[in-house]
Image (cartoon, helix red, strand yellow):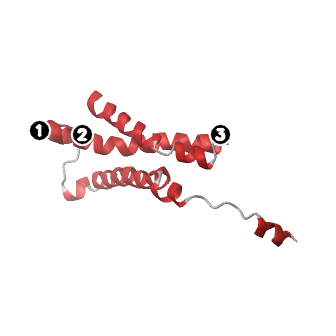
Amino acid sequence: MIMTRLQIKPEAAPDPDIKWTGSSIWMRFTGVGVMGVAYGYFIAYALNSLVRWNLGSESLIANFATMSPLAKGSIKFGLSWPFVFHFVNGIKQLVYDMGVGYGKRTIQASNNWPFIIGVFGALILTFAL
């Protein structure tokens, strides 16, 4: 009896476009990217005394000051966009966790907002700082 009712009205599977091409998979990519860069720097800084790299803040600031404005902007945007996107999309996921706007149409409609806000936020961080 129960199986008959389940066959009549099966559970709705999530849309693959939402899961694989939307902000859900990019949340994972940006999290891995941001933390990969952070852990890479922290490990290199910890190995600083063994391999005699100069990774102190003074040398990083001096090297960054010698770069062209295009290189500076590219590095700043490349580091800030994943961070801003991950932050904004995390807030969106917390709103969904509260049960607000958790529907297929709402998710599809709001899927591009973290990308747009991420780009504008990264541009603000790139050129304002």
Q: Residues within 10 Å of mark 2 (few under 14, many from 20)?
A: few
Q: Separation of disc 2 and disc 3 at Cα? A: 43 Å
Question: Is 81 above or below relative to 124?
Answer: below
Amino acid identity at mark 2 = Ser
SS state under label 2: helix
In the image, what residue occupies the spot 29% across and 41% down?
77
Q: Residues within 10 Å of mark 3 (few under 14, many from 20)?
A: few
Q: Separation of disc 2 and disc 1 at Cα? A: 14 Å
Of circles 2 and 1, the one toward us is: 1
Q: Which of the image's four quarters has the N terminus?
A: bottom right
Q: Residue under circle 2?
A: 57
* Disc sitting over residue 100 in the figure: 3
| Residue 87 picture location, percent across and down | 46, 41
In the image, what residue occupies the spot 81% across and 72% down?
3
Amino acid identity at mark 3 = Val
In the picture as drawn, the residue positioned furthest to the right comes out as 1
SS state under label 1: loop
Asked if the residue under mark 3 is in contact with the one under mark 1, i.e. CB atoms within 8 Å, the reply is no
In the image, what residue occupies the spot 30% across and 51% down?
41
Question: Is 21 above or below relative to 3?
Answer: above
Which mark sits nearer the N-terminus, 2 or 1? 2
Which mark sits nearer the N-terminus, 2 or 3? 2
Q: Residue under circle 1?
A: 66
Q: Residues within 10 Å of mark 1 (few under 14, many from 20)?
A: few
Amino acid identity at mark 1 = Thr
| Residue 121 picture location, percent across and down | 37, 34
Q: Would you say 53 lies left or right of 38 here?
A: left
Q: Separation of disc 1 and disc 3 at Cα? A: 48 Å
Tell which of 39 and 90 is nearer to you: 90
